[in-house]
Image: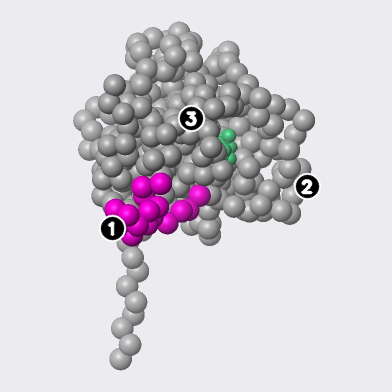
């Protein structure tokens, strides 16, 4: 007789958040509520991404540029609006920073001021939007410097080290939509069930393999790299060391490249240009790209450093849109990269 297939116990993100909150005595629930508002906006963005090819006004570029001189895509602006609208009036933030806004975003008059700050890259991987390739959202949450203040938050509240994050995470709009985040204990992944409209727990305690055979970098920029970076990339591709050469995988969306390496193991590098003035400090932004990814990487057992070997989470941000170099991935792979850096 055929046995009836057992239904896997499914835990929704909302249930998970409540259960986690109950474990913390005297928790106010403010953080849980903030996460719910973020997730609501993520579902709206996911819905639009899913049917982007069918909509008239969502693909392609706008005539606007952001603070970094990059052309804003329509979906960049849409995602920015969706997250801001949901977050700035949710009552749990005191200030926000977004890749798409030069200045800090204040909480509108008349709305409650919360104790958290958020920095966000509403749509990561803009160059992949129009071609149906995975894109994402990256976010970083800190507690404001004076948690009891009811005054509007300031830039200073946002410019805190990555090691002080209360939460770092991303949403990947890929073959499925996933939310991955850490609050500093472990890394958890939820997958959106489109039929329920709910994120369900799918990846508990995510651990990055200690080693990995994938390297991800935009090798088209290699002429601009330092000799140290060139030597390292040459080394991992060569058979001289007796090892199997690594495999190149590069999507061009940090979220997607990182997510793959988190699951499979490997290393991602975005070095600086040493011979052109385009990205003298690297391309990726510290507050809302490198720091949250570094928080996740470390919590999953990986590492994240600059090309000079500084720990990303120790960097003191000086401005909202500051860029950094980023070498992130499996522990052993990043450690091997560090052996290529000249000790000065
Ligand atoms: P964004 O779309 O938010 O501006 O970020 C783009 C970033 C990141 O997602 C990716 O890792 C990197 O730019 C790709 O850059 P190249 O196209 O220079 O390789
Ligand atoms: Mn980005
Ligand atoms: Mn972006």
In the picture of the structure, the residue carrying the numbered disc 3 is 272
**Residue in the foreground of this view, choosing between 220 and 38:** 220
Q: Is 129 rendered above or below residue 26? A: below
Q: What element carries label 1?
A: loop
Mark closest to the chain's N terminus, 3 or 1: 1
- Along the viewing direction, whichever of 192 and 163 lies nearer the viewer: 163
State whether residue 37 appears in this view: no
Q: Which of marks 3 and 2 is in front?
A: 3
Query: Which structural element holds mark 3?
Result: loop
Residue positioned most to the bottom: 1
Tell me where the magenta segment starts and ends, as one range: 234-250
- As drawn, the label of residue 26 is none
Q: Which x, y percent locates residue 41?
A: 55, 38
Q: Nearer the viewer, residue 14 or 317?
A: 317
Q: How far apart are marks 3 and 2 (CA)?
A: 37 Å
Q: How far apart are marks 3 and 1 (CA)?
A: 29 Å
Mark 3, other Cα within 10 Å: few <14 / some 14–19 / many ≥20? many
Q: Which mark is residue 242?
A: 1
| The quadrant where residue 45 appears | top right
Q: In this view, does 206 lie to the left or right of 63?
A: left
Classify the position of the C terminus by image quarter: top left
Dot 3 and dot 1 residues touching (CB under 8 Å): no
Reading the chain from its start, which is encountered first: label 2 or label 1?
2
* SS at badge 2: loop
Tell me how the rendering is colored. one colour
Query: Which is more toward the observer, 207 or 180?
Result: 207
Residue receiving disc 2: 56
Name the quadrant containing residue 10: bottom left
- Give the distance between the C-alpha atoms of the residues marked 2 and 1, in whole angstroms: 54 Å
């Amino acid at each position: 007789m055929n046995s009836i297939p057992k239904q896997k116990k499914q835990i929704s993100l909302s249930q998970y958040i409540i259960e986690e909150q109950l474990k913390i005595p005297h928790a106010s629930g403010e953080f849980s509520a903030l996460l719910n508002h973020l997730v609501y906006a993520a579902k709206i963005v996911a819905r639009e991404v899913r049917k982007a090819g069918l909509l008239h006004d969502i693909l392609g570029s706008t005539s606007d540029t952001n603070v970094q001189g990059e052309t804003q895509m329509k979906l960049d602006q849409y995602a920015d609006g969706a997250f801001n609208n949901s977050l700035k009036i949710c009552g749990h933030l005191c200030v926000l920073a977004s890749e798409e806004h030069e200045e800090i975003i204040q909480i509108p008059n008349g709305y409650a001021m919360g104790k958290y700050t958020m920095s966000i890259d509403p749509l990561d991987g803009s160059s992949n939007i129009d071609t149906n390739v995975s894109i994402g959202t990256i976010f970083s949450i800190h507690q404001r410097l004076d948690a009891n203040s009811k005054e509007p938050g300031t830039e200073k509240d946002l410019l805190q080290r990555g090691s002080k994050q209360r939460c770092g995470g991303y949403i990947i709009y890929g073959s499925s939509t996933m939310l991955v985040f850490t609050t500093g204990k472990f890394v958890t992944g939820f997958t959106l069930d489109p039929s329920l409209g709910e994120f369900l727990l799918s990846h508990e305690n995510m651990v990055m393999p200690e080693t990995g055979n994938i390297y991800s970098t935009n090798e088209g920029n290699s002429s601009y790299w330092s000799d140290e970076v060139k030597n390292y990339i040459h080394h991992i591709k060569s058979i001289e060391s007796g090892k199997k050469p690594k495999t190149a995988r590069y999507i061009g969306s940090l979220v997607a490249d990182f997510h793959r390496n988190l699951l499979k193991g490997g290393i991602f590098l975005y070095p600086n240009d040493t011979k052109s003035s385009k990205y003298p400090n690297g391309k990726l932004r510290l507050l809302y790209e490198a720091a949250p990814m570094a928080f996740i990487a470390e919590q999953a057992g990986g590492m994240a450093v600059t090309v000079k070997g500084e720990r990303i989470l120790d960097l003191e941000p000086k401005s909202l849109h500051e860029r950094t170099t980023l070498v992130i991935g499996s522990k052993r792979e990043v450690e091997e990269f560090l052996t290529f850096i000249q000790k000065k």
